Image (tube, rainbow, N blue to C red):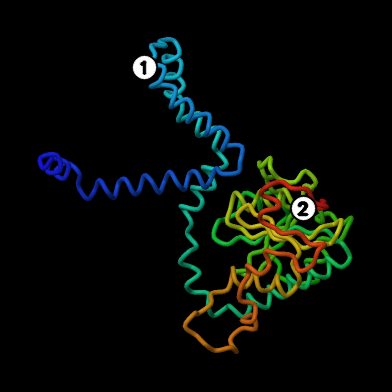
Amino acid sequence: MDNFFITLRSQFSFSNVIEILVITFLIYKILMWIRGTQAEQVAKGLIIVLVLIPLSSWLGFTTLNYILNIVVTWAVILIVVVFQPELRSALEQLGNNKLFDRMFRSSGERKIYSNIQEIAKAAADMSEVRMGALMVFPVNTGLKDIEATGIKLNADISTELIENIFTPNRPLHDGAVIIDLWSGKVKTAGCLLPLTDRKTLNSSLGTRHRAGIGISEKSDAVVLIVSEETGTISMAEKGVLRRGFSEDELVDLLAERFITIDEDDDSEDDLPYDEYENINDYDEPADEKEMSTTETFANGESSDEEK
């Protein structure tokens, strides 16, 4: 027994431990990237194939084993084709080059907060008159390919501009607006967004909501959606749709995402969003007509949601 541990220790170095941890982390991230998409079912099929290869060899199924080995030989190409959206999203996140930029943006926090207030007011105004809207706020992942599908504006953020864009029968009202809070610009309007691949979503969700969820799955963007049917204000982030936001709650959520908060600063006068501390409070509806958010849309339960 002592010889066994001595041999194991001599062959199992610290670098092996690091390698195992890295591989485990990569497998975990891959599973998280494909969870809830059509690619998840394909991944299950590939796992079954990998299990069948040694099983068919052990049972002596020569022909089946030969076919399965051919499938594995071409597996790399198949994975690139089948998992293209997920691989693209993963590489965009790994290649993110804006993380360090956020360290130098504290001087513009008040401007960002002012723009957030403009956006929240526009959403509240459109909610009152049931004017549909779809706004995308990139965080770190670039959306150049999405911006290319719309009309370039590069205009300063304002309540009036946003409401004007989404006014019915205007040329750009049906598309999405890309808003860069870092630069304070409405980048593009009339953009086309990818729809979510998830089959578990409520069938009553319209294209606007499915597009909002879709872009939030494929990037780290925060998406604001105003229902054209009920005026309900929703937010999509990381594939999760949350509904029933008020104007103040919108300000709080966007401030949490886009404004760096100094935890060591006890001053209450820096920015006027300190009173809204726990965004989890908004996971449950304020009254009976609103629905709970994460669980409802993840499980595909019924709702009165609309376009």
In this rendering, the answer to whether 274 lies above or below 64 is: below
Which quadrant holds residue 188? bottom right
Give the amino acid at mark 2: Gly
In the rendered structure, the answer to whether residue 63 lies left or right of residue 177 reads left
Q: How many marks?
A: 2
**Number of residues whose C-alpha sits closer than 10 Å to that of mark 1, classed few (under 14), some (14–19) or many (20 or more):** few
Question: Which residue is pictured at 80% across the width and 55% down the height?
Answer: 172
Hey, which residue is sitting farthest front in the picture? 1
Mark positioned earlier in the residue sequence (1 or 2): 1
**Mark 1 residue element:** helix
For disc 1, the marked residue is: 58
Q: Is residue 266 left or right of residue 125?
A: left
Describe the element under mark 2 as helix, strand or loop.
Answer: loop
- Which residue is denoted by mark 2 in the rendering? 175
* Residue found 63% across the figure and 78% down from its top: 111
Q: Residue at x 43, y 24 (%)?
A: 72
Quarter of the figure with residue 294: bottom right
Asked which quadrant contains residue 110, the reply is bottom right
Does 14 appear above or below 276?
above
From the viewer's side, name the closer residue of 148 and 106: 106
Label 2 CA crowd tier, 10 Å (few <14, some 14–19, many 20+): many
Kindly report the distance in space between the C-alpha atoms of the residues bearing marks 1 and 2. 56 Å
- The percent coordinates of residue 64 (x first, y second) are 45, 13
Please say if 151 is above or below 49: below
Please identify the residue farthest to the left as the structure is shown: 3
195, 31: nearer the viewer: 31
Lateral position of residue 130 relative to residue 213, left or right: right
Type of the residue with mark 1: Trp
Q: Which mark is residue 23?
A: none
Nearest-to-viewer mark from 1 and 2: 1
Q: In the image, residue 216 lies at what x, y percent?
A: 63, 53
